[in-house]
Image: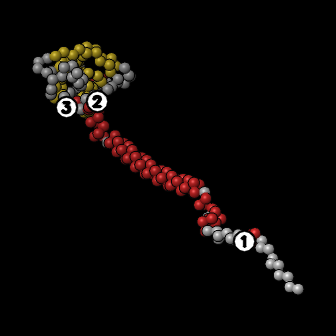
Amino acid sequence: MSNPKPVEPRKNQSDEQPLPASTSADEHTDYENPNKKHGLGHGFGIRMFRAIEVALALAGVAAVVIGIKTWQESSIEKAVQKELSDEATLRKIAAQAQPMLIFDANGGFISDSGGLAYIDRIVIEERDGTFPVKLLVKPKRLLSQPPLLSTIDNILLEYQARRREGMDWEYLIKMRVIQGPGTDSTLCRFRLEVLRNP
């Protein structure tokens, strides 16, 4: 009698299937580098950072420009204030605005604000006591209108001006009114304002 053949164990079907290939490093990238999966968010952060850098740079430039402009305006203002506080400059401004001069009852000049550029001299031709009632103004240049005559004291004048020979203007004082008590008409000071030719 023959011996029976040994029964070989059945192979499991799963044992016959090849083992899966080892997982590549790329497939584990999601675990090793989460930012690679979310590349859009990472790029947005970089762009935001660069935008902030540009904004800060622009703000710095704007601050410098504003500082320079403020300094320039301050320097100009100081220069203008310095010029306006200068007496010679004020005289030039007054002379350009309205040239005038002040003279006494003898025709002597007391002060000048540009008037002497137009007026050569003033001659007193007649008096009422010590008060001038007829004056002759002799200009240096042709004045199409007679200069305005008044006083810097409390005396109002009514006068008539007419053309004389050449460029001269004659003033006839018809009436004077003393406004304040204690005003001495013998010490009257006159103002002559030159009217520019139109």
Q: Amino acid at mark 3?
A: Ala
Separation of residues labelled 1 and 2 (CA atoms): 117 Å
Which residue occupies the foreground of this view, 100 or 28? 28
Which label lies toward us, 2 or 3? 2
Disc 3: which residue: 117
Q: Is residue 127 visible?
A: no
Q: Amino acid at mark 2?
A: Ala
For label 1, count other residues whose C-alpha is less than 10 Å away and answer few (under 14), some (14-19) or many (20+). few
Which residue occupies the foreground of this view, 60 or 174? 60
The reply, left or right, for residue 65 in relation to residue 122 is right
- In the figure, 33 relative to 79: above or below? below
Image quadrant occupied by the C terminus: top left
Disc 2: which residue: 97
For label 3, count other residues whose C-alpha is less than 10 Å away and answer few (under 14), some (14-19) or many (20+). some
Q: Earlier in the sequence, mark 2 or mark 3?
A: 2
Residue 112 location, x and y as percent?
Answer: 24, 33
- In the figure, 79 relative to 186: above or below? below
Residue 88 location, x and y as percent?
Answer: 28, 40
For label 2, count other residues whose C-alpha is less than 10 Å away and answer few (under 14), some (14-19) or many (20+). few
Q: Secondary structure at mark 2?
A: helix
- Furthest residue toward left: 166
Separation of residues labelled 2 and 3 (CA atoms): 13 Å
Which residue is pictured at 26% across the width and 32% down the height?
95
Q: Amino acid at mark 1?
A: Glu
Q: Secondary structure at mark 1?
A: helix
The reply, left or right, for residue 27 in relation to residue 83 is right
